[in-house]
Image: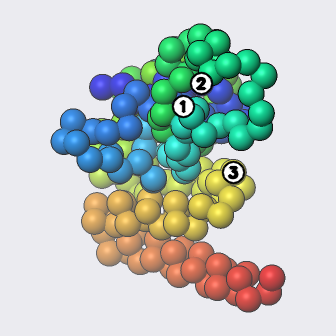
């Protein structure tokens, strides 16, 4: 089920999508930060992760003087651009083939505007990470750190928390060391600035 459509990009791997409906069917806000998403491609699906969200409200978009009366401004543009909504930032982490094989490499293709975005099912998230049969893969780690700014540490932590219950003791311990290292870097980095 489509949750959003691509409306732009900040780079080859950093996309912006507008959520179809900011409210879920249950009436509340759907959890989005740290959720894995799928975007159709010719070879399967691009896999991304939601790292940011922004509320947009055209009513409060311009605080300067109006050049035309409000009714004339309301006719400018498409109807969907005039509603409040939610934009989400998605970092592309790799691809998931039709056979369920995850690849954590940079995509070769640009994702066109208007392409649908949907949440990735839990079993596909595990397959993308090489689970349940293998060791967890986080080949996209450096992309998250360099592209998600202040959200990098909480984003990696959310990935680790999601994967930990599926791991054997040794793999879970290695991811725990990674989480502790990130927290240490955040603490030390915060005191030096």
For the point 65% across and 79% down, the residue is: 186
Q: How is the image coloured?
A: rainbow
- Provide residue 62's location: percent of width, then percent of height: 70, 36
What SS does tag 3 mark? helix
Sequence-wise, the earlier of marks 1 and 3 is: 1
Where disc 1 sits, the SS reads strand
In this orientation, does residue 162 appear?
Answer: yes
Residue 7 tag number: 2
Is residue 111 in sight in this rendering? no
Q: Residue at x 61, y 62 (%)?
A: 152
Residue labelled with disc 1: 17
Q: Quadrant of the N terminus?
A: top left
The residue tagged with tag 2: helix, strand or loop?
strand
Who comes first in sequence, dot 3 or dot 2?
2
CA distance separating discs 1 and 2: 5 Å
The answer to whether 63 is drawn above or below residue 176 in the figure is above
Residue identified by numbered label 3: 147
Q: Which x, y percent locates residue 56?
A: 55, 38
Q: Tell me the CA gap for discs 3 and 2.
A: 18 Å
The image shows residue 129, relative to residue 136, as above or below, that is above
Tell me, yes or no, whether the two marked residues, 1 and 2, touch with CB atoms within 8 Å.
yes
């Amino acid at each position: 089920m489509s949750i959003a459509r691509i409306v732009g990009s900040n780079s080859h791997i950093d996309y912006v999508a507008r959520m179809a409906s900011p409210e879920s069917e249950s009436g509340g806000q759907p959890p989005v930060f740290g959720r894995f998403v799928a975007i159709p491609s010719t070879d399967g699906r691009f896999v991304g992760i939601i790292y940011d969200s922004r509320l947009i409200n055209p009513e409060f978009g311009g605080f300067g003087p109006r050049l035309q009366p409000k009714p004339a401004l309301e006719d400018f543009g498409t109807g969907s651009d005039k509603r409040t909504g939610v934009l989400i930032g998605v970092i592309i982490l790799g691809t998931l083939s039709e056979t369920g094989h995850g690849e954590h490499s940079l995509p070769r293709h640009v994702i066109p505007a208007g392409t649908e975005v949907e949440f990735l099912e839990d079993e596909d998230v595990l397959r993308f990470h090489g689970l349940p049969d293998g060791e967890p893969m986080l080949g996209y780690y450096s992309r998250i750190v360099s592209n998600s700014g202040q959200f990098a540490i909480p984003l990696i932590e959310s990935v680790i928390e999601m994967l930990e219950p599926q791991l054997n003791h040794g793999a879970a311990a290695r991811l725990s060391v990674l989480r502790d290292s990130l927290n240490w870097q955040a603490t030390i980095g915060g005191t030096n600035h």
